Image (cartoon, rainbow, N blue to C red):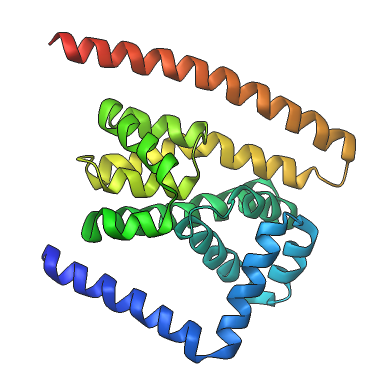
Amino acid sequence: MNIKQKRILFSACVLFLIILYFVLPPFRGFVDQAVSIITSGEAGQLQQFILSYGVFAPAISTFLMVLAVIIAPIPTFIITFTNGLSYGVLLGGLLSWGSALIGAAICYYLAHFFGRPLVVKLVPARPLDWADEFFEKYGVYAVILSRVVPVVSYGAASYAAGLTKIKFVPYMIGTAIGQTPGTFLYSYIGASATNSYTFLFWLFGAIIVFGVLASILKKWISRKSSQKDRR
């Protein structure tokens, strides 16, 4: 399948979902309710919403994660937190990790195929410009860092990567590596949320850990970039 065919396929899928949203009131109501709950930050309410679908709950969680990634300003960590609360550290973490990767791949290809005119309609200009410069300068190392320490939203970083020369496979590998610590840490915090003291302890610890990792990775990336410039 060549690029033109892939672009047509993506366009058809996006158009189909848009038509569903406006033509089917139940689907529109589902999406609107889900977005409202996610943006409210109420993990308990989101958990009830997801689990109300029974055996289809993991599929609903996956859809919500992909939706949150594509609509870049929507926070994804609350879904990761809720999956940990609902399914535990391992299963909840794997569910969030895999569904976030799907969203990352879709965002990359949307940006890659349709370019900046589409992306600027989905992502605020300021974080997009920052991510553009960061990714162009540091390449795949920037992908890893942006996943470890989400200085811009997950979706914004995904779209920005699709606008650069970073290849898809290195991008996905960097994303998979970089998002692993945060995904399972948030899952652990979610699984421990029934104990308020444990929750606060791990939340505070997460802030410290991410700060230290950001400092280490920034120095490492700068050193790699300097070595590359000297060659």
Quadrant into which the C terminus falls: top left
Q: Is residue 109 something that shows in the picture?
A: no
Residue 7 percent coordinates (x, y): 20, 68
Residue 105 percent coordinates (x, y): 35, 55
Residue 27 percent coordinates (x, y): 56, 83
Q: Is residue 82 something that shows in the picture?
A: yes
Quadrant position of residue 160: top left
The residue at the point 57 percent across, 37 percent down is 182
The residue at the point 27 percent across, 26 percent down is 137
Residue 175 percent coordinates (x, y): 40, 41
* Residue that sits furthest to the front in the current view: 125
Quadrant into which the N terminus falls: bottom left
Tell me how many marks there are: 0
Q: Is residue 106 above or below residue 17?
A: above
The residue at the point 31 percent across, 32 percent down is 133
Q: Is residue 37 left or right of residue 140?
A: right
Quadrant position of residue 207: top right
Q: Is residue 70 left or right of residue 226?
A: right
Q: Is residue 4 above or below residue 96?
A: below
The residue at the point 52 percent across, 90 percent down is 24
Q: Is residue 95 left or right of residue 124?
A: right
The answer to which of 188 and 147 lies nearer the viewer is 147
Q: Is residue 151 above or below residue 114?
A: above
